[in-house]
Amino acid sequence: MTTPAPHRPRRRPRLHRAASDLPYFSADGESYLAQTTLRELEKSRPLRVLSEEDFAHWQTYGYVVVREAIPAEAAKRLLDFTWDFQGLDPGDPDGWYADRPFRSELDRQLHVYGFVEAYHHQLLWDNRQARRVYDAFVDVWDCEELWVTQDRLNLNPPNVGNRDRALIEPTDRGFDIELHWDIDTTLGVPPQRVQGIIALNETGPESGGFQCNPELFRRFEEWKVAQPADRDPLRPSVDRAEYPVVRPELRPGDLLIWNGLLAHGVARNVSRDQVRAVQYLSMMPALEEHERLRRSRVDSWRHLRTPRWNRTLVGDPVRHESERYPTATLDELGSRLLGLTSWKDAWETPAADRSADTGTDPGTGTDAGAASGTDAARSADAGDGPAADTDRGAAAGRGEEPACAASA
């Protein structure tokens, strides 16, 4: 006779406290528990990039646009790299739909949505460690000790041919590329989550791109009360006449930041020959005591490995980026945003020099970060060289860094 194994309750994930003075807690660096929601947060630090009107819009409607977060020229350089990485010619629309190998159904869906599996090129890291970008996230989190996401790019041409969204079988519940939430909105205490994109080109009314429902965000508590108990936690069902979907206008170099409670998605590209191009980029309170996560982030940067925080990050199927270019150089701020250097360590650059480029007062203790050109992030064993990440099987569910559901 076999004795049945005793039932073991599911282990609760351990919460790690972020390295910030504000009490942010997270098990995975994806969703955070806080004493106050971001939409109700009262600022303790002066605003650096956002105006008072910008911050009020962020808290009321769930998103904010930071104009020229990076120079338009930097956006153009990254756009050119994106075309080159894909082996596509911007002047040859027919070539955008050439046959390519698909390793799985997920691979094919990522192609339809236009995801570009590059994560660690120098141009990507230059934008991640741009001080105006960093300062904008300091404004919304009200803390300086942040980590930046290691995310990818998107280059979405007209959704026809082998990029037609009709090739993806629709579902009745759960994630929907057109409109969804980044968090489970049925939870009694919703987690805090922040996402962002940098526009690499001009957005047109027909080229698709980010869209959202700010009125639903503003009236969410009122709307929620009237919903059935079994409503979809990720996909809103709303009257779009009462809760209209809007598409913010973005120019090259603009940064759009949104709250995870904002219903959002990516509109279909219905143009004839336009593309939508963005870099996915967000920042969140640094979980420095989460050593496994910190090591994973550093190793991914150092060896150009495909990040492991989301199973939909799969690496390029033709030629992995670790075979294309060297490890990116980080400045002092970038080293802290990665997790290579602790936020508790002293700065090599004086505060007065760091604040000069950001307009902050060195006497307030709210300096923005690093002086560019520093090689502090270069570690002694970076010469190990890049290596492709060959272990992708356990990536699902690891939750080692935040991801927007639209990135999935």
Image (cartoon, grey):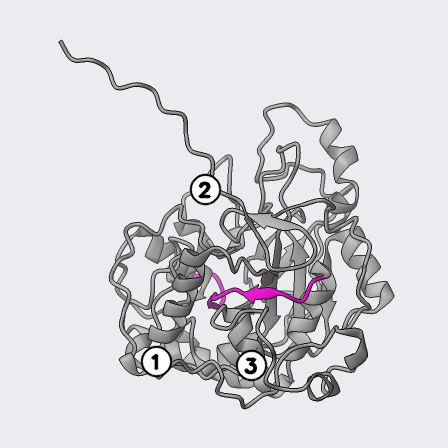
Q: CA distance from mark 3 to mark 2?
A: 45 Å
- Which of the two discs, 2 and 1, labels the residue nearer the N terminus? 2
Residue at 55% of width from left, 72% of height from top?
Answer: 336
Pointer 1: what residue? Answer: 382
Amino acid carrying mark 2 in the image: Pro
Of badges 2 and 1, nearer the viewer stands 1
Residue at 63% of width from left, 86% of height from top?
Answer: 349
Please, is residue 127 above or below residue 31 in the view?
Answer: below
Q: Secondary structure at mark 3?
A: helix
Q: CA distance from mark 2 to mark 1?
A: 45 Å
Q: Secondary structure at mark 2?
A: loop
Residue at 39% of width from left, 62% of height from top?
Answer: 296
| Side (left or right) of 116 relative to 2 | right
| Side (left or right) of 363 relative to 317 | right
Q: Residue reaching furthest right?
A: 52
Pointer 3: what residue? Answer: 332
Q: CA distance from mark 1 to mark 3?
A: 16 Å
Residue segment shown in magenta: 143-160
Residue 88 makes an appearance in the image = no
Query: Total marks drawn?
Result: 3
Of badges 3 and 2, nearer the viewer stands 3
Residue 369 makes an appearance in the image = yes
Q: Residues within 10 Å of mark 1 (few under 14, many from 20)?
A: some
Quadrant housing residue 293: bottom left
Amino acid carrying mark 1 in the image: Ala
Q: Position of residue 205 (x, y in %)?
A: 66, 65
Pointer 2: what residue? Answer: 170
Q: Nearer the viewer, residue 225 or 335?
A: 335
Q: Residue reaching furthest top?
A: 1
Q: Residue reaching furthest left?
A: 1
User: Which quadrant, please, contains the N terminus?
Assistant: top left
